[in-house]
Amino acid sequence: MRILAAVCGLLFLTSSYAETVALPDTPAATRLQQLTELMAEATPERVVSYIDRHYTPEYAQRLPLANRIGSFMNWHRRGGMNVVEVRNSQDNRIEVITHQPLTDERWLLGVEVESEPPHRVQALMLGRAPLPPMKESLTDAEVAERWLSYVDELAGAGLFSGAVLIARNDEVLGQQAWGLANRDFSVPNTTETRFNLGSMNKTWTAVAIAQLVEDGKVSFEDPLSKFVDYPNADDASRIRIKHLLTHTSGLGNYFTDEFEQTARKNLRTIDDYLALSADQSLAFEPGTGGAYSNTGMMVLGRVIEVASGQNYFDYIQQQVLNPAGMSRSGCFELDRVNDNLAVGYAEQWSVEGVELKNNLFEHVIRGGPAGGCYATVGDLHRFARALNDGTLVSQDMAHTLTTPKPELDSPNYGYGFGIHPNRALYGHSGGFVGISANLDITVDPDGWVVVVLANDENMRAPVMMARHLIGVEEPE
């Protein structure tokens, strides 16, 4: 019965837009046709041969060859790309909408070629395109059933390993897990498996700051220098707490060469991380631009410690996770015994083929204010509910956290929360080698919570399909 539902659901979703269209007779269209044929029939050897013969040397060298092979093989496993619409066509440039038959994903694909023969590829551009609007009105239960069936199909094709949950308000409509949490010992993922969140737990740090604001210990307008002189006294006096929360501080990231050369076991405190980027200068004057900053969120961890008088990890556990009922979540030290933590896995491609690698030696020993902590799908639903029902912060403060801040050059990011371009939802994603995660909390239509946690890098297709089935309108 489950298999039949999965197949029927997938046929419904593809039937409205799977028809391919003819391409114009131009050099760019010819190359695009060749590229889509390569996607459909890709092998590492064919990819290498095509790049050698038909990419300009400058463009071929822009990315490592292994990355190029990996991209084509990923497209191949998703059914290739069928052109369903031509958006723009010139002799040396074409933009089309493509559809991937196996996963129902749509992409805006652009190809630019040299103006003169042999018209080699000098740019390949890719961006997500929205799915066509639903032609059918679904009940909440039908949305959940169709979505779980879709993810089941992905997992069956080796395109998803992890756990998902879909709920509306307090009602969990469905949750399920697929794949292996540990491939060495064939341990399956379950809905109680704890997955690495990547950057998603930046939201925990933001909630902690908001609590301290409501307690009168911090203000969003406070200069960073009130709590710590980082990276130096002058910069700290110009950076405000609101800049750190919106990635508009000008600070950068601690994923530096020194990070790569440091034993992961030596990175477990906030000071350990901040030391990696202490010599970086501001990229711009705080509040005048935006650049995603892991260092900025890590500094907020220090602010929490100074303002609360508690260790960051203790504060998060006692003031965020425990009140929300998130009993299986935390920032775990990986050299300790932690039950049911999923190991992340990533594919590493070369001309010889693919090798599956775990991320144990890519990971830090302990996640923190900027990411890398763990949770279950159920705990993240509890977090979403506690955020909005007054448990963690007031409802007015929750609104402040989850609305955009265009006045700070942050039109699609609030205070620690990502905001949908159409304002239809908020939440946060996360990614690292071998992991991917996403939390969506919808505003229009309201009340939906969708959690996707993966111990591979394939969370995006389930996320986009959930939004489609729910009725979230995606921008072009």
Image (tube, helix red, strand yellow):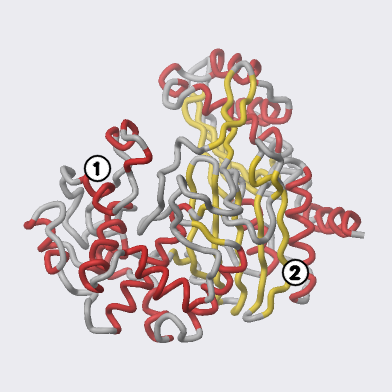
Q: Which residue is mark 1?
A: 276
Of 469 and 166, the residue lying toward us: 166
Q: Image point 79% across, 71% down: which residue?
A: 142
Q: Which residue is mark 2?
A: 143
The part of the image, by quadrant, that contains residue 228 is: bottom left
The amino acid on which the numbered mark 1 sits, given as a three-letter code, is Leu
Of 38 and 247, the residue lying toward us: 247
Quadrant occupied by the N terminus: bottom right
Q: Residues within 10 Å of mark 1 (few under 14, many from 20)?
A: some
Q: In the structure shown, which secondary structural element does the residue marked by tag 2 occupy? A: helix
Q: Image point 69% across, 56% down: which residue?
A: 190
Q: Image point 25% across, 66% down: which residue?
A: 305
Q: Looking at the picture, how far across and down is residue 353, in whole percent? A: 64, 21
Q: Point out the tag, 1 or 2, that comes first from the N-terminus.
A: 2
Q: Looking at the picture, how far across and down is residue 94, in whole percent? A: 56, 37
Quadrant occupied by the C terminus: bottom right
The amino acid on which the numbered mark 2 sits, given as a three-letter code, is Val
For this orientation, the residue located farthest to the front is: 337
43 with respect to 110 (left or right): right
